[in-house]
Image (tube, grey):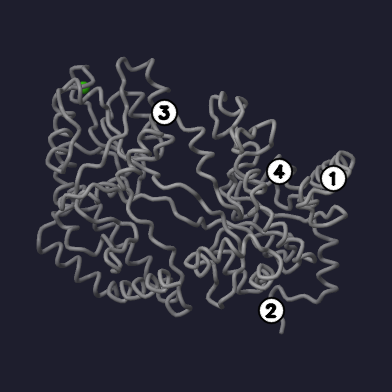
Amino acid sequence: MKNKFGYTVLCIFLATLSLSIGANGNQEAKATQDSSINGSESLSPHAITSEPLTLSIFLHYWNSRIFTNQPVFQEAAKETNIFLEGAASKVASNSNEVYNMMMASGELADIIHTGRTQLIKHAAEGAFLPLDDLIDQHAPNIKSFLAERPNIASYLKAADGNTYYIPFFPDGDPAMGWFVRQDWLDKLGLERPNNVDELYTVLKAFKEQDPNGNGKADEIPFYQRSKDNGFLFMLPLFGISIKDRAVDGQYMYGYYSPELKTAIQTLSKWYDEGLIDQEIFTRGNKARQIMFDTNNGGMTIDWFGSTSQYQATYEEKIEGLDWQPMAPPADIYGTRWIDSYRNKVNDHGWGISVKNEHPVETIKYFDFWFTEKGRRIANFGVEGETYQMVNGKPIFTDLILKDSNPTAKIMSYGCQLEFGYQQDFNYEKQVLNEVASKGIAEYQENGYPMEAFPKLSYTVEEEDWISNNKTSIETYIREKVQRWLLGGEECDDASFDEYIRTLKNMGIDKFMEIQQAAYERAING
Ligand code: CA
């Protein structure tokens, strides 16, 4: 049997020889190899081969994250004797384009890093080796990691039942939270809002009582930087979410629930009254910076780490600034929660291409990153330089902690690139400021983040239905909701009934059925 990527052994050998790698890539790998050989007489217990082995890697994603043999990979090479050299252009800026060019050329790197969707698609065309037997026989750390996480192990499998990639596994619980201008609350003599009615009172006061003191009603009480979903971060106040969710074993879809009517009616009223950013659908990613530059934003919902930094950045510029995380106001049923959690599995990962002549060594290399040492390198970088062991725990050095942007600094070492390993939340804790840590602890202790929803995998038939129908359903929903919120159409009973009818005609019940079945498969392993 031959398919698009099916080659004989000889062809594999020739193709590997002719694999085009930039001259710089070669020199780089060679230089580190030599220094490693000279520098260490005895092999590390993690050594995979006695002679150094070089594998090519394609890692180029988000148009900016690119393999450049960062220090973490050099550290791993010292341990494993496996050296990587980059097969993706370091100057190209369109990740999809570079990836597609490589796939079209057939000159595949030994290791290919990309997103789940395209990886599985190309695996179906024969570009990737199935990893299950390799893991079973040669990767004890990955094997036990997956054995402890049966849901994830089943999520990783493609529709043909094989596993083709090892993903990045994020760590840590709370991700996003509410933030408020505590100094505005104090100035107006208000308490933090405990429920939807109190939230309305606070937003109204922010709008009408000039907390920034410039004599103008220029305050924007609530803003959010996501163009598509900014508004919808408030849906949990009404007991629903646009995120996949299950309550008592039942799959829930916020856009297809009776509470949506109340939510839209309330939020469009708030929007009319100027309590929600009038540009919420267009302002976009810089919203927080803009709100602090003009000192007129009151509240938002966003990531703890990055959002808390605005306190330090603006406290000299804005007198009395007190920017604090706060508990989510309770929803209409009395529960405080937020529809944010950290996924247990990321959709970026790496696989072994069919051109790879060393699949056993490669899976052992993948396995190294699941050892204690490998995981530590991936999270903390270079011992003695970016971190030190203190009482058996890796602690960042001042090189990182005293940097003006610790996260960016540690990333320049290659840490936190999303390839196959498990993140260690302690990394993030060490670089978080006090405000963020406090917020995260409060959310964690009170259980505000909603329960993580498992990643769903679909049968071929389900996948077909989804790819043929889901986009049009989502487009319809997005346009309708936006029209309601912006006042182009009133969300009255007749309009809402018509919306539900249209969704039914578009097959929403079939969608719910597929999601329910996939959810049950995911939780039952
Ligand atoms: Ca004002």
Residue topped by disc 2: 3
Badge 4 amino acid:
Thr
Give the CA distance from mark 1 to mark 2: 36 Å
Residue topped by disc 4: 68
**Crowd around label 3: few <14 · some 14–19 · many ≥20 (10 Å):** few
Answer left or right for 173 relative to 103. left
Give the CA distance from mark 3 to mark 2: 55 Å
**Residue drawn at 60 percent across, 34 percent down:** 391
Q: Which is nearer the eye, 186 or 14?
A: 186
Badge 1 amino acid:
Gln
Callout 1–callout 3 Cβ contact below 8 Å:
no
Answer left or right for 128 relative to 448. right
Quadrant placement of the N terminus? bottom right
N-term-proximal mark, 4 vs 3: 4
Residue 525 placed where, x, y %?
46, 72
Would you place residue 60 above or below residue 128 in this image? above
N-term-proximal mark, 1 vs 3: 1
Give the CA distance from mark 4 to mark 3: 33 Å
Callout 4–callout 3 Cβ contact below 8 Å:
no
| The image quarter in which residue 307 lies | top left
N-term-proximal mark, 3 vs 2: 2
Q: Which mark is on residue 434?
A: 3
N-term-proximal mark, 2 vs 4: 2
Ligand 1 near label 1 (Cβ, under 8 Å)? Answer: no
Badge 3 amino acid:
Glu
**Residue drawn at 86 percent across, 46 percent down:** 42
